[in-house]
Image (tube, rainbow, N blue to C red):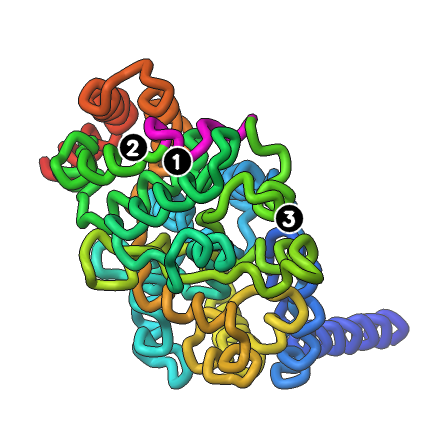
């Protein structure tokens, strides 16, 4: 009799344990990078209140270690359910089959739709006509300029075309009358200006299904030669070693124009105060022709779902929540990350800010870089390397671009092998 009672008690404990486990919330693991990982936690209580059956565990990952940590997690099958990716990283994790195809989720969603986003930004997440990430926050690059110096040089507006940029630069150099001062800062050891001008000129940076370099094309060659002309004619300093502090240099008239992103607005406001407070402004980038503005880079971060996650529906709910206009605005107030959702830009915060309005205009014309896993290796090592060789006149434009294509073809050798294998 005692034994029967003991069994009954154990059975009751087992039943109660099962009932408790069934009522436990689903744990959703979410990795976010840098400051985003710190501040996004402040938005999640509202999500968990709306979804009491979901508990979100956020892990903050430093940007400097993010890519390595994500690859390590993939290799050990420990990727989180939802994670943040810089939008140039999306192709890499797609090539690993690590991220979920989101097309069906978007199709059924009542809140996330392609039309809610800037076309160029949305496109960074589209591979082979399939969407793999949802833009979370965005950035791009525009032209910072000293309006007072442009006025002294005889111009009442920023450059709108390449020709105008060149003419303004020559006029600035002349009016400053100082060989140690320049019109524009175009760091030769940064890839972005060279790629931006190429994209503006409709250059296809790669060819044959992104398996060969195409930097020797007439379109890119024209753009590359245009940029390097500023260095050769002493309108721009060579390299970054001559500029220890871009804000001080801008203030001291060492250069009067500079291409950069929203992350520098706050610092320029801090450095240019008092009599210089109204001496500068930003503008969309100039265009090759009169079709102003010219294109810029489609930057930012996206949210993706682990293809092996067991809680994909819950993961999608989190992405939908973080994509709401209200939540995007709250995130901006916390961190100044520009919202990806276009409707958020209709808020008075953006409509009444002269700087943010410029970024909105530029976001209407942004382009994605080649969407392959090898792109960052190409951009950060090879393009910078041969741009430096050219502006220092170690190589001619033709020699540098031919060598660049040769090196890129070597980098893309494995990609060509995989493409050939898939076609067999």
Name the foreground residue: 383 vs 81.
Answer: 383
Mark-to-mark CA distance, 1 and 2: 8 Å
Name the foreground residue: 357 vs 297.
Answer: 357
Find disc 2 in the rendering and name its residue. 229
Mark 1 or 2 closer to N-term?
Answer: 2
Q: Secondary structure at mark 1?
A: loop
Asked whether the viewer can see residue 81, the reply is no
Task: Find residue 290 and name its label.
Answer: none
Provide residue 293's location: percent of width, then percent of height.
29, 62
* 340 sits left or right of 294 in the view: right
Name the foreground residue: 352 vs 69.
Answer: 352
Find disc 3 in the rendering and name its residue. 61
Residue drawn at x 50%, y 39% is 71
Using a 10 Å C-alpha cutoff, classify the residue at mark 2 as few (fewer than 14 neighbours), some (14 to 19) or many (20 or more): some
Look at the picture and state if 79 lies above or below 341. above
Residue found at the far left of this picture: 424
Asked if the stretch drawn in magenta spans residue 237, the answer is yes
Task: Find residue 235 and name its label.
Answer: 1
- Which stretch appears magenta? 231-241
Using a 10 Å C-alpha cutoff, classify the residue at mark 1 as few (fewer than 14 neighbours), some (14 to 19) or many (20 or more): many
């Amino acid at each position: 009799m005692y034994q029967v009672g003991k069994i009954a008690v154990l059975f009751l404990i087992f039943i109660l344990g099962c009932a408790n486990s069934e009522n436990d919330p689903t744990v959703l693991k979410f990795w976010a990078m840098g400051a985003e990982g710190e501040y996004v936690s402040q938005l999640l209580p509202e999500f968990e209140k709306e979804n009491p059956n979901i508990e979100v565990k956020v892990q903050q990952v430093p940007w400097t270690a993010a890519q390595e940590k994500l690859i390590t997690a993939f290799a050990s099958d420990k990727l989180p359910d939802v994670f943040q990716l810089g939008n140039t990283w999306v192709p890499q994790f797609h090539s690993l089959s690590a991220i979920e195809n989101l097309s069906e989720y978007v199709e059924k969603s009542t809140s996330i739709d392609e039309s809610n986003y800037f076309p160029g930004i949305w496109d960074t997440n589209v591979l082979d006509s399939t969407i793999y990430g949802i833009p979370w926050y965005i950035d791009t690059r525009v032209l910072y300029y000293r309006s007072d110096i442009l006025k002294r040089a005889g111009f009442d507006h920023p450059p709108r075309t390449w020709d105008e940029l060149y003419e303004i630069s020559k006029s600035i150099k002349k009016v400053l009358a100082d060989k140690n001062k320049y019109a524009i800062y175009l760091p030769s050891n940064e890839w972005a200006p060279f790629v931006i001008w190429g994209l503006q000129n409709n250059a296809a940076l790669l060819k044959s299904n992104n398996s060969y370099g195409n930097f020797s094309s007439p379109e890119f060659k024209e753009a590359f030669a245009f940029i390097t002309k500023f260095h050769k004619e002493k309108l721009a300093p060579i390299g970054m070693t001559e500029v220890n502090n871009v804000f001080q240099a801008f203030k001291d008239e060492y250069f009067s124009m500079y291409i950069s992103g929203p992350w520098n607005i706050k610092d320029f406001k801090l450095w240019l105060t008092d009599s210089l407070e109204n001496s500068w402004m930003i503008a969309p980038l100039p265009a090759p022709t009169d079709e102003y503005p010219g294109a810029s880079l489609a930057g930012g971060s996206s949210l993706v779902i682990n293809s092996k996650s067991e809680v994909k529906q819950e993961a999608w709910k989190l992405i939908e929540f973080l994509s709401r206009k209200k939540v995007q605005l709250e995130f901006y107030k916390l961190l100044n990350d520009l919202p990806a959702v276009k409707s958020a830009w209709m808020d008075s915060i953006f409509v009444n800010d002269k700087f943010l309005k410029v970024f909105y205009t530029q976001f209407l014309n942004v382009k994605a870089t080649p969407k392959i896993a090898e792109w960052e290796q190409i951009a950060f090592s090879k393009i910078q390397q041969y741009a430096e060789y050219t502006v220092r006149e170690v190589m001619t434009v033709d020699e540098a671009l031919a060598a660049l294509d040769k090196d890129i073809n070597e980098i893309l050798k494995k990609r060509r092998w995989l493409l050939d294998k898939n076609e067999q």
